[in-house]
Image (cartoon, rainbow, N blue to C red):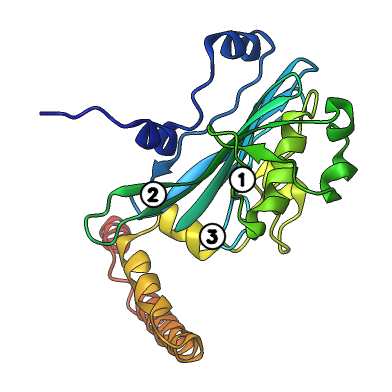
Amino acid sequence: MKTRLTQSEVLGKLGLRIPKETLAKLKKAGIESEAAVTATRAGLVSGFESGGAVAEVGAYCSYVAGDGSPLPLRKKLQSMLGWNGKHAFVVAPLMVRIQIVRAGRLCDLLISKHYISKADATLINEIIATGRGLLDSVNEWSISAIQDRSCPRFCDNNGELANIPASFQSAVVKVVCGSCCVGCQHNHLLSIPEQRTELQLTIGMPTSPSVEEILADLSASAWIKQALLSALERDPVDAANDAELLSKVLEAKCQLALQTAETNPHTENGGQESNRES
């Protein structure tokens, strides 16, 4: 028999439960904030940084690493004509989701951790903190530079101060800014990898893929994924040296095969040409 999810399980899986009135206002304003996380076939967790605001309401959701440090975005999603929607896609072995839903100056906060269980490969969702807070001024929080300020105070259902880990407070500040960013067209929290420019991420110019991107790529072969996972468990210097040696061996084998084909052109096309000549 299928059991009903508890309130904590619903929060962990789908995010904050938004009151109907607030949800209607968000939809009317065209604000799309996707809070649900997904498990990939490669055993990773994926999600979207998304959201934005109008003066009356706002919602924003994004992700950080387990220690609170910024996660690199995989791909930017917004166009020059879009706003208050999905800004970027992110994938990682473990992610901490930070979500804010704002109605006026009143904000609801959810912080939750997500990862794949090694025991049975299921998606684990753990609640870290929830709370409700009151902003001093929505207009001040709509300014991007205000992200350097201290974290707002949030209280739990008992009216006591919510325990927000210090490592996530900076991220909470940025997500609050996102929930106040009117006509938001950019990501507030995910970081752009140093080797990629914002233009490259937006238009999809080719760059060297990261470990997470290869593991999450459905077009990548099972062999390369298995080899990569095996290499990650080894000393990185030894693994890199062996990979370089393997690359040279395979390249030499490829060159030998090409040379053999050139000196012995017994191909189907070659046979057909000989027959035509005779």
Would you call the spot at circle 3 few (<14 residues within 10 Å), some (14-19), or many (20 or more)? some
Q: CA distance from mark 3 to mark 1?
A: 21 Å
Q: CA distance from mark 3 to mark 2?
A: 25 Å
**Residue 189 on image: x %, y %:** 70, 47
> Is residue 174 in view from this perspective?
yes
Q: Is disc 3 in contact with disc 1, using a CB cutoff of under 8 Å?
A: no
Residue 200 as seen in the image, left or right of residue 8: right
Q: Is disc 1 in contact with disc 2, using a CB cutoff of under 8 Å?
A: no
In which quadrant of the rendered view does residue 61 lie? top right
Residue at the disc numbered 2:
218
Would you call the spot at circle 1 few (<14 residues within 10 Å), some (14-19), or many (20 or more)? some
Question: Image point 29% across, 30% down: which residue?
Answer: 5
Residue at the disc numbered 3:
66
Question: Image point 88% across, 35% down: which residue?
Answer: 143
SS for callout 1: strand
| Front tag of 1 and 2 | 1
| Front tag of 3 and 1 | 3
The quarter in which the C terminus is drawn is bottom left
Question: Image point 60% across, 34% down: which residue?
Answer: 159
The quarter in which the N terminus is drawn is top left
The residue lying toward the viewer, choosing from 94 and 42, is 94
Q: Earlier in the sequence, mark 3 or mark 2?
A: 3
The residue lying toward the viewer, choosing from 188 and 80, is 188
Query: Which residue type carries mark 2?
Result: Leu
Task: Reply above or below: 190 against 4.
Answer: below
In which quadrant of the rendered view does residue 55 lie? top right
Query: Which residue type carries mark 3?
Result: Gly
Q: Earlier in the sequence, mark 3 or mark 1?
A: 3
Residue 138 as seen in the image, left or right of residue 44: right
In which quadrant of the rendered view does residue 76 lie? top right
Residue at the disc numbered 1:
75
